Image (cartoon, rainbow, N blue to C red):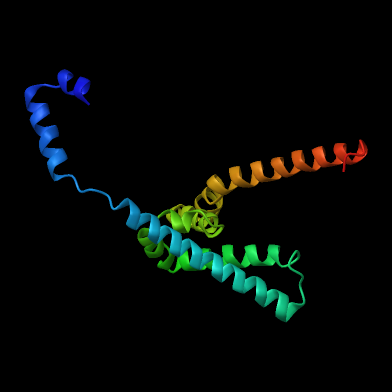
Amino acid sequence: MGKDKKKLTPEQQKYQTLQQKHELKRPVLKNCFKAFWVGGVICAIGQAITYFYIYFFNFTEQTAGSPTVATMVFLSMLLTGLGVYDHIGQYAGAGTAVPVTGFGNAVISAAIEHKTEGFVLGVGGNMFKLAGSVILFGVFSAFVVALIKTILIQWGVL
């Protein structure tokens, strides 16, 4: 910081000192706690949905994963459309972005933002800007893992 101050004019140094004096300190520990407990609640809801599928639809723990993820993404999209998820995200920060619900929020937010441009070019063209890359790299990485597993099975390692 000392080297940067030497390059500044005296007026800029005064401004920087004043700005640092009035800058609000971020409550990092408080923000981490909020993100942790909100993310935990989201995961607990996901676990409850998993048990719902196991109990009422006779899924196993392995087969209940896909419908649980689909339900969580749908719920986050619904809450985003209703304007609720944004308030939760403002409160919890990364606690809402890290679970799979953050993916659903990002997809539907882009669609809502561009709805004035029409359904095809606005909503359809923009909702997969983020999701497209996630889906592409997800499919590609699944292909690579399956290829490695196939090779290892052929060699008798697995």
Q: Is residue 132 left or right of residue 7?
A: right
Residue 137, visible in the rendered structure: yes
Coordinates of residue 96 in the picture (x, y in percent): 46, 58
From the top left corner, tell me how far across and down residue 81 is, in percent: 46, 65
Q: Quadrant of the N terminus?
A: top left
Report x, y in % for residue 61.
73, 67
Front position in the image: 23 or 132: 23
Of the pair 80 and 16, the residue shown nearer to us: 16
- Report the side of 54 relative to 2 (left or right): right
Q: Is residue 115 visible?
A: no
Residue 137 percent coordinates (x, y): 65, 41
Q: How many circles with numbers are drawn on the protein?
A: 0
User: Is 157 left, or right, of 65 in this rendering?
Assistant: right
User: Which quadrant of the structure image shows residue 51?
Assistant: bottom right
Q: Residue at x 55, y 65 (%)?
A: 43
Identify the residue at horizontal 73%, vertical 44% (top origin): 142
Vertical arrangement, residue 11 with respect to residue 29, above or below = above
Which residue is situated farthest in the bottom direction here?
56
68 is higher (above) or lower (below) than 58: above
For the C terminus, the quadrant is top right
Is residue 68 shown left or right of residue 84? right
Q: Is residue 77 above or below residue 129?
A: below
Q: Residue at x 77, y 77 (%)?
A: 58
Please tell me whether residue 114 is drawn above or below residue 15 in the rendered image: below
Residue at image x 60%, y 45%? 134
